[in-house]
Amino acid sequence: MEIAVFSFVCAVLLCATVAQTKPTLRKERVHHEPELSRQAHEDNKSFQYDHEAFLGKEEAKTFDQLTPEESKDRLGKIVDRIDSDADGYITTAELKAWIKRVQKRYVYENVAKVWTDYDLNKDNKISWDEYKQATYGYYLANPEEFEDATDQFSFKKMLPRDERRFKAADLNRDLAADREEFTAFLHPEEFEHMKDIVVLETLEDIDRNGDGHVDEDEYIADMFAHEDGGPEPEWVKTEREQFSDFRDLNKDGKMDQDEIRHWIMPQDYDHAQAEARHLVYESDQDKDQMLTKEEILENWNMFVGSQATNYGEDLTRNHDEL
């Protein structure tokens, strides 16, 4: 039903040519950090994992086609960007922050694609009023057309929810989002200061009786509609066991916000931290636990170097395998 209503609303908006965007929608419940690379991390055999972690998969392909001199030149420019305090040293923390940004590159690319849809006055910021007009303008001008829309997709409910999220992302409280703030608004699960909002929105999505908790039936109803009255599938029974054994941590029969956070934001192994430590350890010649640009360029092959034994072959090989 949610998809059907969403399609109807989008059709109305597109036909009206007033608003070409849509309000934020719920996403998959459980959020895992994206993997650094699909390559196995075999320290003694290949640097491909390191390349993809440091550069991102697509950028790693680009570097594979460069000469050593070109790779070192580009790497030097990247090092300057990683050195956030410009003190000439790359710390593990700075390297971790860079790797995490590379992990989230798809997020920033997504924001870049939609930026002009919202930045109506082209001042390189998106105000709350601009977002509201782009997303809800037609609804606000023609509310009578949406009176029969199901509560699962209600503009009346989504507007204040989006405003609350926008204000949480707006760190300087000027009601205008720069690129980073708007990225946090559209992709709150990727930002630490937005995770409380993600938890709250998840609770509001699932908590049908409005008691501020998620009980077992609400948890199941979020993923399974028992319409025919027949027996529940085995996977639903398994999910009920999961709720009892792993979701309801304090065994009071329901999930509070802390338990919801534990469910949808599991504390995964910090791959970025581990990779940053690995790169520092392998390249830190003077063992001061920091890297200079010279140390990184000296070990350039670990960071960006091509693994082809012959440069000519590297230019022509099939990169899809990466």
Image (tube, rainbow, N blue to C red):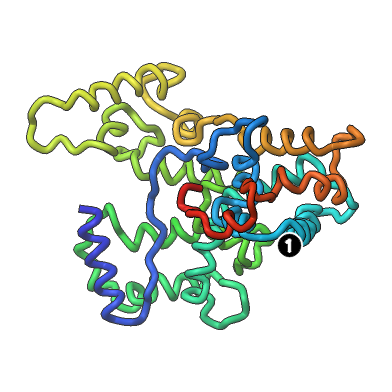
Return the residue nearer the eye: 134 or 110. 110
List x then y, in percent, for residue 112. Answer: 54, 68
- Does the rendering let one see residue 168? no
> Which residue carries the number 1 mark?
70
List x then y, in percent, for residue 85. Answer: 84, 53
91 shown above or below 318: above
Q: Residue 278, located in which quarter of the rendered image? A: top right
Return the residue nearer the eye: 175 or 308. 308
Residue drawn at x 68%, y 36% is: 273
Classify residue 285 as left or right of residue 265: right
List x then y, in percent, for residue 20. Answer: 37, 74
Residue drawn at x 55%, y 51% is: 57
Q: Which element is circle 1 on? A: helix
Residue drawn at x 51%, y 40% is: 38
Classify residue 206 as left or right of residue 102: left
- Does the rendering let one see residue 239? yes
Return the residue nearer the eye: 102 or 124. 102
237 shown above or below 30: above
